[in-house]
Each structure stands twice: as C-alpha cells, then as structure tokens.
Image (spheres, grey):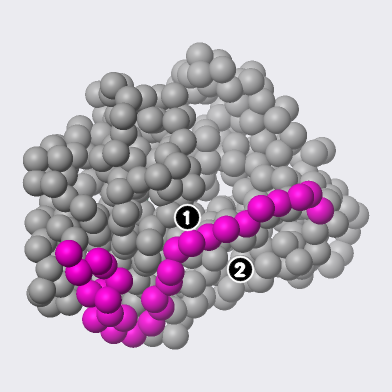
Amino acid sequence: MNNFDFQNPTKILFGKDQIKKLSKEIPSNAKVLLLYGGGSIKKNGVYDQVKTALANFEVLEFGGIPANPEYAVLMDALKVIKNENITFLLAVGGGSVIDGTKFLSAAAVYEGEDPWNILKNSERTMKGMPFGSVLTLPATSSEMNSGAVITRRETKEKLVMGGPGLFPVFSILDPQVVQSIPEKQIANGLADAFTHVMEQYLTYPTGAMLQDRFAESILQTIIEVAPKIMKNPADYNTAANFMWSCTMALNGLIQKGVPTDWATHMMGHELTALFGIDHARTLAIILPSHYTYNFENKKEKLAQYAERVWNVTDGTLEEKAKAGIEKTKTFFNSLGIKTSLSEYTNDYKGTAEIISKRFTERGWKGLGERQNVTPNDVEKIVEMAY
Ligand code: NZQ
Ligand code: ZN
C-alpha cells in the first residue's frame, strides 16, 4: 500500500428533511448567494424548503447554471458576488451547480489577472470563499470532494480544477430529492459513480485489501440498486443507498494508498466539450475501449473484478478479465446507455486525432495509473470507441 494523507472536512447531513437544518450550518451574519441550475428546484419543492430554512438570512439568488457549467454564465455570477459583497455561497443542485460554485469560490478570492488561468494553468485553490451544498442529483460526489470541471463553449474546452480550499463546508443529502429526477439523469448518475470507482480500482494489484473491498462493495451496491431506482425513484431506501454510494465513490476515501487511472474521464471530457454528450455517457463510450486497449496492464484487476463483483468463476485469468469488460458494457446498456461514439453523433470521424492533438498541446504525455497512455494511444482508444 502506498503512503497517504487523508483529510475530508465536509460535514454531511444525510437523510429525510435535513434541509431544515440549513440555517444552523451558515454563519448568522453571512450574506448568501443561492446558486441553482435550470429550475428543477422550483418544481420539486427543494427551492421552497431552502428559502424557508433561510428565512432569517440575507439571500440573493443566481439561477441558470447549465449542465456542464459554463464559464461565461459563471463570470456573470462572479460579478454579483463582487458587487454585492457576498460572503457565503450555497449551491442547490447537481454536480454542475456545485462545480460552478466551486469555481466561484476560487474566483471570488483569486488574486491573479484572469480567473480562466485557474483552469488553464491548473492553479490549485488553497482557500476559497466558504460554500455549502444541497445536493439534488446523486452522481459526481462533488458534494464531498474538492474538484470541479468547468466548460467553455467559446473554445470547446472542458477543464478540471481543485485544491484543498474547495471542499464544501457542509452538504445536505436528502434522498427524497431523487424522486423528481428524470430516468435519463438517474442512469447518468449510476454510470458516473460506477466509473468513478473503476478509475480508482481497475488499475494493478497493490495488496490494498481494504481499498479493494471498499471499491467492490460500492460497485455491487450500485449494480443492486440500479434496476430498482430506475423503476421507482420514489423508493426512499433505494434512493438512500444510491445517493450514499455515489458520494462514497469519489469523496477521496477509496483512492487513498492506491494508484488511480482517470484516463477514461480525461478522454470523456473531450467528447462532452466537442459534442455536448452527457458526462456519464462519454465514460461509457471510452471505458470498454480503454480497458481493451490496455488489457495487458489491467488484466489482473479485471479478472479480480469479474470474479468478485460479477461472480465470474470459470475460465483462465484472461477469459475472466475479458468477461469483466463485457459485463461492464452490458451494465451500461442495461441503463439505456450506448457505448459507441457513432451512436451519439454522425460527426465522429477525425475525433481521435483532435483529442490526441489537444493532449499533446497541453503537454499530457502519459495518462493512466502507469502514466504510459500517450496521446498516440489516446488516438487509438478513441478510434476503437467509434
Ligand atoms: O438544471 P436543473 O433544472 O436543476 O436540472 C438538472 C440538469 O438538467 C437536472 N436535475 C438535477 N437534480 C434534479 C434534476 N431534475 C429533477 N429533479 C432533480 N432532483 O439534472 C440535469 C443534470 O444535472 P447536472 O448537475 O449537470 O448533473 P450531474 O450531477 O451529473 O453533474 C455533471 C457535471 O459534473 C461534472 C461533469 O463533468 C458535469 O459537468 N463532474 C464533476 C465531478 C466532481 N466535481 O468531482 C466529477 C465527475 O466525474 C464529473 O466530471
Ligand atoms: Zn465522472
């Protein structure tokens, strides 16, 4: 097992009607900016619950943060923060609203010239403006981690940022919010969280027994709840298991002491940037090709995954490993998620070269747990995913 430091300062308030506790978590003298997305919170009652809980606070609002939070929109929110002397940010939404809020937390105290540099130059944020979240969509774990992904339509870029200053102070996780989520977004949440675990688990064996078992148990729980939550998002207990699995998938715990991959995410982000494909779906497109292309490097873990998560007991190590890739594809398909790029766009020719070139230009020489997936490999993997 590798050495590690682990600190996750986010306070979680999990369960039914926890939104009521909001007022106790925000400093009483705070000037709050409530940030939200396209308006789902106004239809499902979350907005009203938040407003009631914040009745004694000075609250301004900024709505309209789109899925794949857009830089230009966030820059408008930044003006409000500065002009109105906001002191606390409250994200009410899914990963996009929370990520957008993280960017604002960083940009609000940024001393550099242009906040875009935070993303362009991967400048880590050591201390941001404090913020909390009320999660409305289980998927990203943004509610309990310090990373964010921001999109800029103008240049078709989607870049990551983060730093220890970007953990939410608190996040409220009420599984009752799941009942209003459209089926397509539930499928996205399941596939995204599943892939988060895979990125931290499906590498090479390091004898980290507990991390492996943590990862496998989250995968198994997601597999078990998937058909139930797709069928009935109002089933509270299933929603609770779905929500907590998604949070645990990327709150930092399972990646401690082990190598991590993240190549699927890096390639996937480019597909969202270029074609606007939902984040989770880009992962389902890339993951099977990435694992097939890097089969030799990953086959031990793939076989362990097939055995322990999917109960594949027959065959050689290679056969089990291959079965693991197939099972994953079938799982994505069972969520109604297609796994080839050509099923999303007719415009796919040339994509592999574009992405490979972008990685070269950014100086990304080697991705993956061994840092050996070169831009040339990326080109082949994306091509395999057509
Ligand atoms: O905008 P509104 O109207 O609120 O509707 C949203 C949005 O259209 C809707 N929705 C959310 N909660 C709902 C609901 N509809 C009905 N009832 C509810 N309770 O769902 C749609 C999608 O929301 P979004 O926030 O975009 O989804 P998600 O949580 O999947 O976030 C995706 C973003 O997170 C990034 C992705 O790249 C993408 O930009 N990621 C962030 C990560 C992180 N911070 O650690 C890691 C991930 O790998 C990912 O990259
Ligand atoms: Zn993801």
Q: Considering depth in this image, is 280 or 345 the residue closer to the camera?
A: 280
Amino acid bearing label 2: Ile
State the residue at coordinates (62%, 65%).
219
Q: What residue does disc 2 label?
A: 218
Q: Secondary structure at mark 2?
A: helix
- Residue 372 falls left or right of residue 379: right
**Residue 383, quarter of the rendered image:** top right
CB at mark 1 closer than 8 A to ligand 1?
A: yes
Q: Is residue 189 magenta?
A: no
Q: Is residue 181 visible?
A: no
Query: Residue 129 got which mark?
Result: none
Magenta segment, which residues? Answer: 1-29
Instruction: Answer above or below: position of 247 versus 13.
Output: above
**Residue 156, quarter of the rendered image:** top left
User: In the rendered structure, which disc, 2 or 1, sits on the residue that comes first in sequence?
Assistant: 1
Q: Secondary structure at mark 1?
A: loop
Instruction: Answer above or below: position of 3 versus 295.
Output: below
Q: Considering depth in this image, is 209 or 237 the residue closer to the camera?
A: 209
State the residue at coordinates (24%, 81%).
20
